[in-house]
């Protein structure tokens, strides 16, 4: 079993929809949670960084962490075609330095 | 502020050769981590350097090695290339050695093709 599970999709939604992307993890040592967006043939771009249970909002993006359930989510409001990309969750441990453990990524397509 | 730069962007090699990839972190960042991205395995951690010291190493064979220089620039080397080494190699830069408030920023990657 992988340490971090993420549905690979693809996920297709109409423009303006609310998108929900999720990851589950098995190791409670993970304490820092990130979401990256990766466009085709580009490097991952950091969208959100959180470390505590609860919600963190940044523009159209909301990151949610539930440490008791080992479940993290990224919500995208008013989705746009430019949001079409692969979304990766990444987790790191306390004392684990900068090593990130990634989910497989969810491919999102926002259609006009 | 300039982002993370990686050179070269594309590379084609043949089996058995060796290759060196370079990463320049964001100015002021002292940590560089390397990742391999393939369609089958996703993003996998290779190693991490902080202030010229390797702090973490992933589960890759000894053919994969790296180093960091005093100006924080880093190189990774792959010797005796195999077909399975074809991948996008990404480096990530961060200010500190991990923990709270230590975001990591990725470069555009080097796409290595082994023939």
Image: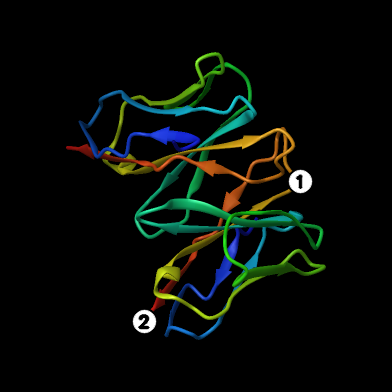
Image mark 2: chain: B
Q: Secondary structure at mark 2?
A: loop
Q: Are marks 2 and 1 in contact (CB under 8 Å)?
A: no
**Residue B74 seen in the current view:** no
Mark linked to residue A42? none
Residue denoted by label 1: B96
Q: Position of residue B74 (x, y in %)?
A: 69, 67
| Residue placed most toward the observer, B80 or A95 | B80
Q: Which residue is depicted at the point 81% across and 58% down?
A: B51
User: Compared to A101, does A19 lie above or below?
Assistant: above
Horizontal side, residue A103 vs residue B63: left or right: left
Q: Position of residue B21 (x, y in %)?
A: 58, 74
The C terminus of chain B appears in which quarter of the rendering? bottom left
| Residue placed most toward the observer, A112 or A62 | A62
Q: Position of residue A107 (x, y in %)?
A: 30, 42
Are labels 2 and 1 assigned to the same chain? yes
Q: CA distance from mark 2 to mark 1?
A: 38 Å
Q: Nearer the viewer, mark 2 or mark 1?
A: 2
Q: Residues within 10 Å of mark 2 (few under 14, many from 20)?
A: some
Residue denoted by label 2: B115
Image mark 1: chain: B
Q: Which residue is depicted at the point 36% across and 54% down?
A: B40
Horizontal side, residue A87 vs residue B57: left or right: left
**Residue A45 seen in the current view:** yes
Q: Which residue is depicted at the point 43% across and 83% down?
A: B15
């Amino acid at each position: 079993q992988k340490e971090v599970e993420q549905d690979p999709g693809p996920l297709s939604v109409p423009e303006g929809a609310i998108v929900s992307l999720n990851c589950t993890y098995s190791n409670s040592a993970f304490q820092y949670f990130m979401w990256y967006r990766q466009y085709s043939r580009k490097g991952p771009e950091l969208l959100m960084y959180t470390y505590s249970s609860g919600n963190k909002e940044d523009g159209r993006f909301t990151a949610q962490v539930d440490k008791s359930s080992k479940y993290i989510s990224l919500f995208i409001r008013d989705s746009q075609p430019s949001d079409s990309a692969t979304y990766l969750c990444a987790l790191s441990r306390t004392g684990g330095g900068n090593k990130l453990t990634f989910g497989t990524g969810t491919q999102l397509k926002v259609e006009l | 502020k300039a982002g993370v730069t990686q050179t070269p962007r594309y590379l084609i090699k043949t089996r058995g050769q060796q290759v060196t990839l370079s990463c320049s972190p964001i100015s002021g960042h002292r940590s560089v981590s390397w990742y391999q991205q393939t369609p089958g395995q996703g993003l996998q951690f290779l190693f991490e350097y902080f202030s010229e010291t390797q702090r973490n190493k992933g589960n890759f064979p000894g053919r994969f090695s790296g180093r960091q220089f005093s100006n924080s620039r880093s190189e990774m080397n792959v010797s005796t290339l195999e077909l399975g080494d074809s991948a996008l190699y990404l480096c990530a830069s961060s200010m500190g050695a991990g923990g709270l408030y230590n975001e990591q920023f990725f470069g555009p990657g080097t796409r290595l093709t082994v023939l």
